[in-house]
Image (tube, coloured by chain):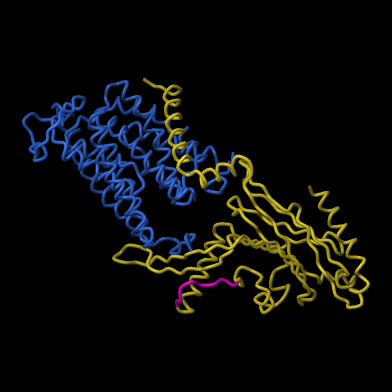
Chain colours: A yellow, B blue
Amino acid sequence: MRKTTLALVFFLAGALASGSVRAQQEGQESIEIGLSTDSVSITSGFSGTNLTIFGALDNADPLVSRQGRYDVIVVLEGPARPVVVRKKTRVLGMWINTDSQEFANVPTSYAVAMTRMPQDITNTGNYSRLAVGAENLHIRPQNGESPATIEEFTKALFDEKKASGLYTERVGGVQFLSRNLFRATLMLAPNVPVGTHRARAFLFRNGTFIRETSAALTIQKAGAEQRIYEVAHDYSFAYGSAAVFLAIITGWIGRLVFRRD
Amino acid sequence: MGIYLPIAEMSVNVIVLLAMGGAVGFLSGMFGVGGGFLITPLLIFYNIPPAIAVATGANQVIASSFSGALAHIKRGTLDFKLGGVLLAGGIVGSSIGIYVFALLRRLGQLDLIISLLYVALLGAVGGLMLVESVRAIRRASGGQTATLRRPGQHNWIHRLPLKMRFRASKLFVSVIPVLGIGAIIGFLASVMGVGGGFIMVPALIYLLKVPTNVVIGTSLFQIIFVAAYTTIVHATANQTVDVVLAFLLMVGGVAGAQYGTRVGQKLRGEQLRALLALLVLAVALRLAFDLFVRPSDIYSIAPLSGA
C-alpha cells in the first residue's frame, strides 16, 4: 500500500513539474497530498489505526527548505453532527443536568498533525482565519444563549472530545522526508466515526500561509459488521427477534454445556 | 483481544466482556435476578453509549435467565401459572413504561429519574430485606426453624377476592395483587431498562409469601419475556441492540448462570436473601454516590437526534 502511494505522489510531482515554469515566475509554492488509501474499512479486528498521508511541495525554495522554514499542518476532520452539551449543577444536594446548549455542526472527530508547536508555525490570527485547530472551528450554537454561556459550553465540548480521544493534536506528526516530500501520521481512534472525512493540508513559509489542499477519505464498516448494521436499521423488527432467538439458543446450549446439577 | 462492535461503533476487549457476562450471570442464576441492573451500569462504565447498554443488556439477560430457568424447571422450582399471571400484568406495565421513557428522554432528565428510582427502590428493597434476613438467620442459629410461612398468618392481600390456586408455590391467593405486582414491576423495568428481578424477588417473598426457591425460578421465567419484549422494542424503535456485544456477554452469562444456580441451591433461603440484600444495597450506594458527590466532569455530551 505504501509503495503505491509513493509512486502516486511522485507521479503527481512529475505532472506538476510541467506547470512549474509559470509557477516559478510567480515564486509561489504549491502543496499536494495523496492518501495511502481513499477508504478505510473497519472490520471485526479494528482497534484504531494510523493513517499515513504523503504530500509534496512543488516549486519549493531550496534556501527556505534547507533552513527548515516550511511548515505543514494536516487536519483530518470527521463528518459534522448535531450535538447537545449538558451541564450538571447542584440542586437539593444532587448533581443533575440543569443547563444545555445545542450545536448544529460539530465534527465527530478532529485530528491535527503538524511539523512544529502551533505557536512556532504561525500566529493565532492565521489559525482562526483558516479555521485550523479545534478551538478555531466554526461551530454554530443552536439555541440563543448569552455569548458567555456559549463560550463555556464550547470549551466543555472540546474538552469532552479530547478526553474521548476523538480530537487529537500531534506535534511532529508531519515530517519532511526530503526537501519537498513530507509524511503526516494521524491516529484514527478505535471509536472513529464512520462517514466521509476530509483531509486538509496547509503550507506555511516563515509563518505566512501559502496554500491549502484537501482530499476526501471514506471510513466505512466492511464485511459482517456492515451487514449487521444494515440489517439492524432496515429490518429492525426481524433483527430484534433474531437477537432474542440467539439469546434463547445461547441459553439452551449454555445449559447443556455448563450443566452443574 | 479486540473486536469491533457494529452498532456501538467501537472496538472492545473480548476477555473483559466475557468476564463481565460471567460474573453477572453467576449472580443471576444464584438470586433469580436477570442482572440487568448490574450489566447496564458495567457497560456504561466501559464507555458503551447508555442507549446501547440498556438495550443490549436486555438482550443478554434473556440468555442467562433462560439458562437459569431451565435448571429450575428440572428441579420443579418454577411456577408457570404464577409466572404467567405476573407476565400478563407486566406487559401492561411495561407498555406504559416505554411511553414514559420516551417522554423523559425528550426532557433530558432521564438519567436523573433513573438514578433516583434506582437509589430509592434499591435502597428501600435492599434495606428491608437485609433487616428481615438477618433476623431470620439469628432465629435459625438460635435453634428455631426460620420460615416466612407461619400458619394462620394472613395479611390484607390474602383477603382480596378472585382467588386462584398456585400449586408449585403452595399458594392460594387473589389474582389482583399478582397482576398488580406484575404491572408495577413491568413499568419500573422498562423505565429503568432492567428485567425487574431485584424487585420481583422480594415482592414475591414478602408480599405473596412464595417460598424463596420457587421465587427464583419463577422470577427468571418472567424476566425472559420482559427482556425479550424490551429487546424487540428497543431494536425496532431505536436500533440500539448490538448482537455482537450481546453475544459475548451471553456466552459468559450462561456459563456463570449454571454455576450460580448450583451455589444458590446450596444456600438456605434466608442466607440467599441476605446476600441479595447486600448486593442490592451496594448498587444503591454506588448510584447515590454518583448523585450526591460532585462529579469529576460536570459536562456531558450527547448526539442530538432528530435535529
Q: Is residue A88 magenta?
A: no
Give the residue displayed 52% in from the left and 70% down from the top.
Answer: A154
Relative to A174, say whether A227 is above or below. above
Give the residue displayed 59% in from the left and 54% down from the top.
Answer: A193
Left or right, residue A37 beside residue A63: left
Relative to B55, say whether B255 is above or below. above
Q: From the top left corner, tell me how far across and down residue B110 is, in percent.
A: 36, 57
Q: From the top left corner, tell me how far across and down residue A29 is, in percent.
A: 84, 72
Give the residue displayed 73% in from the left and 61% down from the top.
Answer: A215
Kindly indicate the quadrant of the structure image that contains residue B209. Answer: top left
Left or right, residue A124 beside residue B123: right
Relative to A63, say whether A164 is above or below. above
Give the residue displayed 30% in from the left and 35% down from the top.
Answer: B222
Q: From the top left corner, tell me how far across and down residue A87 is, in percent.
A: 42, 66
Left or right, residue B246 beside residue B170: right
Name the residue nearer the viewer: B116 or B102. B102
Which quadrant does the C terminus of chain A fall into? top left
Secondary structure mostly seen in magenta is: loop
Q: Which residues are magenta?
A: A138-145
Relative to B43, say whether A142 is above or below. below
Total number of numbered discs in the rendering: 0
Kindly indicate the quadrant of the structure image that contains residue B143. Answer: top left
Q: Residue furthest left?
A: B152
Q: Is residue A140 magenta?
A: yes
Q: From the top left corner, tell me how far across and down residue B5 is, in percent.
A: 55, 44
